[in-house]
Amino acid sequence: MLNPEIRRLIAAIVALICAVGTPTARAQDASAWQEQPHAAARLVAGAAVKSGDKEELRAGIEIRLDPGWKTYWRYPGDSGVPPNFDFSGSENVKSATVLWPPPHRFADGAGGHSIGYAGDVVLPLRIVPKDAAKPSSLRVQVSYAICGNLCIPAEANLSLVLSDKAAAAEPALAAAEAGVPRRVPLGARTGLSVTSVHREHDGGHERVVVDVSAPEGTPVELFVEGPTSDWALPLPQTSSTAPGSNPTVRRFSFDLNGLPPGAQAAGAALTLTAVSPHDAIEVEAHLD
């Protein structure tokens, strides 16, 4: 028989072999960058947050673009392709929600304007695990387009094991989340606000007029989305019609074009996103 000392030594060796040979999911601060010509993408992790009675894990998709290159928002504008995200390969993930920082418009090179981002952008993610007691492995296939003098498709397959602890990317992720447009009601007086939305008829021609209130002298951009992704509404333009003598009100208008076949404008729910240098809001408005 083996003496107790030898048995303890063998047990220790077996435990060490099992520990080395068994893969263990370890939380990470960020995935490796996946490089593309003129762009790169990665996943970053953040601390967990409480949302109601459940805990959500936080992460983000960071896209880094070469100078002069841009990528698109969820609604690309006159031209372009919105990003697409496939989280189906994730483990212990019940749902993954993409949040969108405020975009900007830029010339598309064909006489129109697109909507998107330049430089470095982090798209925050909110992750609900199936079982909060177990680690969640986030896997996402990102398909996006990047544009300089020409537009090219890009793709990244990213993975990251998440935890509920703050990571090195926490400041950048928190800053991106802080910039996500606030959801406010139509007419709410919040510094930056959408005060009214109505249709105007000019013979057989229809347009939508939107009044936005912002501190005097503050530049404002306005973007509009239809109730479904197959609505292709034009980008609002600053109207030549003065909205009275109030210098804090900016009037925008756009032609009521780009509706899918069979769609009715009356009663349609529009999503309006107003962006200023220091604030951004998202407002739902139903057309009269």
Image (cartoon, rainbow, N blue to C red):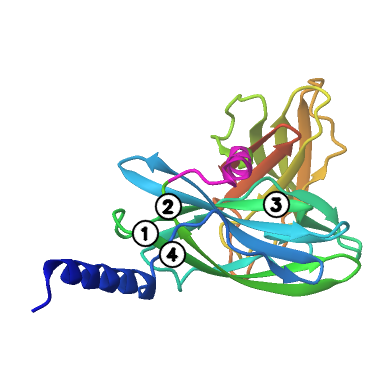
Q: Secondary structure at mark 2?
A: loop
Q: Name the residue tied to disc 2.
A: 163
What's the CA distance linking mark 1 and mark 2? 7 Å
Left/right of residue 129 with respect to residue 228 in the rendered view: left
What's the CA distance linking mark 1 and mark 3? 26 Å
**For the residue carrying disc 3, how many other residues have a C-alpha within 10 Å: few (<14), some (14-19), or many (20+)?**
many
If the image is split into quadrants, where does the N terminus sit? bottom left
Q: Name the residue tied to disc 4.
A: 137
Q: Name the residue tied to disc 3.
A: 121
What's the CA distance linking mark 3 and mark 2? 22 Å
Which residue: 84% across, 54% down? 106
What's the CA distance linking mark 3 and mark 4? 22 Å
Q: Would you identify the image quadrant in which residue 14 lies? A: bottom left
Q: Nearer the viewer, mark 3 or mark 4?
A: 4
What's the CA distance linking mark 2 and mark 4? 9 Å
Left/right of residue 88 with respect to residue 217 in the rendered view: left
Q: Secondary structure at mark 4?
A: strand
Q: Name above or below for residue 200 compared with residue 235.
A: above
How many numbered callouts? 4
Three-letter amino acid code of the residue under disc 3: Val
Q: Nearer the viewer, mark 3 or mark 2?
A: 2
Three-letter amino acid code of the residue under disc 2: Ser
**For the residue carrying disc 4, how many other residues have a C-alpha within 10 Å: few (<14), some (14-19), or many (20+)?**
many
> From which residue to which does the magenta span run?
165-178
> Are the residues flagged by discs 1 and 4 in contact, CB closer than 8 Å?
yes
Three-letter amino acid code of the residue under disc 1: Pro
Question: x and y percent of residue 168 in the render?
Answer: 58, 46
> Are the residues flagged by discs 1 and 2 in contact, CB closer than 8 Å?
yes
Let me know if residue 204 appears in the view: no
Residue 167 belongs to the span the image colors magenta: yes
